[in-house]
Image (tube, grey):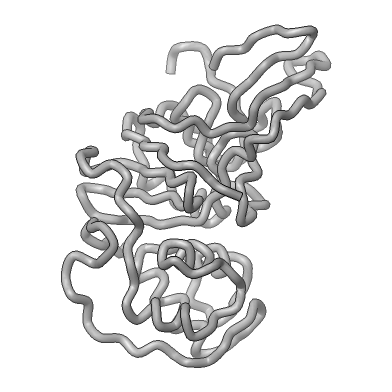
Amino acid sequence: MLALLTAGAVALAGCGVAPAETASHSITAAAGRLAEPPPAVTAPDKKLKLGAKGKAVVWLQKRLRELGYRPGKADGRYGGTTLGAVWAFQKVNGIKPTSTIGKATWRALEQPRTPKVLARNGKRTRAEVNLSTQIMTLYVGGELKLISHMSSGSGVPYCETTVWQGKEQRFCGSATTPTGTYKTTWRRDGWHKSYLGELYNPIFFNGGIAFHGALSVPLYPASHGCVRLPMNVAEELPGLLGTGVPVHVRGKFRR
């Protein structure tokens, strides 16, 4: 990643450190609909709020997993992990994301859409980042393997002072997630400390910009430029997303 010294500050675009040069269930991808008519399903018709428990929550969790989302264990408890998958599903299906599961979400679970394909001529194995909807998708061998809620760069310029490499330094940047086509490069297991904070299981694809787990993944772009993912998604992603895989970043978030 390019770094420019300006008035004692380092100008950055991203949220990690690029090193020196060295080192389920699947759904056939289609635009807006499942490739084959799915078997008829009947969703519960019970309003659920965050913290709910019971059979309707189990049904919700199993259905989301079946469709490629990651709601966590089907334990019948509607917590934060399941909420991230609910938000992703609602956004893909044109429903304003909310923690409440009402009629619109239940009906969509019966007849779901699939995410918009961003790279129609892309390789069969690729990741796509939709900045407009704040959705990350992963295709493996032409099959839609994973759909996740995400939070990209806030677009709000920042300057932060921190101790890095043994001395106090000031880092400034634009907090953007640039559009374009990239490839996954290096990665780290577990928590990785960067000059802008800690990243969980980061997989870098554009200099210091990475997919990584975060404890906060809000419904709006909030990162320094990386693609924040729910922790459970970041736990699974390294086993699905290899090195040298194309990453297509498209769109623009409108507040």
Q: Nearer the viewer, residue 58 or 190?
A: 58
How many numbered marks, from 0 up? Answer: 0
Q: Nearer the viewer, residue 94 or 82?
A: 94
| Residue 126 in the figure: left or right of residue 152 | left
Q: Position of residue 101 (x, y in %)?
A: 54, 80
Q: Residue at x 53, y 37 (%)?
A: 202
| The quadrant where residue 172 appears | top right
Occupied quadrant, residue 144: bottom left
Residue situated furthest front in the rendering: 254
**159 in relation to 117, above or below:** above
Report whether 225 appears left or right of 141.
right
From the top left corner, tell me how far across and down residue 117 is, in percent: 30, 50
Q: Locate the N terminus and report the quarter of the image it occupies.
A: top right
Q: Is residue 46 above or below residue 80?
A: below
Name the residue nearer the viewer: 93 or 163.
Answer: 93
Foreground of the two, 102 or 188? 102
Q: x, y (%) of residue 49? A: 63, 81
Q: Which percent across, then down, holds residue 94?
A: 44, 66
Instruction: Identify the residue shown where x is 66% and y is 28%.
Output: 194
Question: In the rendered view, does 179 fall on the left or right side of 169?
Answer: left
Going 35% across and 49% down the picture, which residue do you hit? Answer: 138
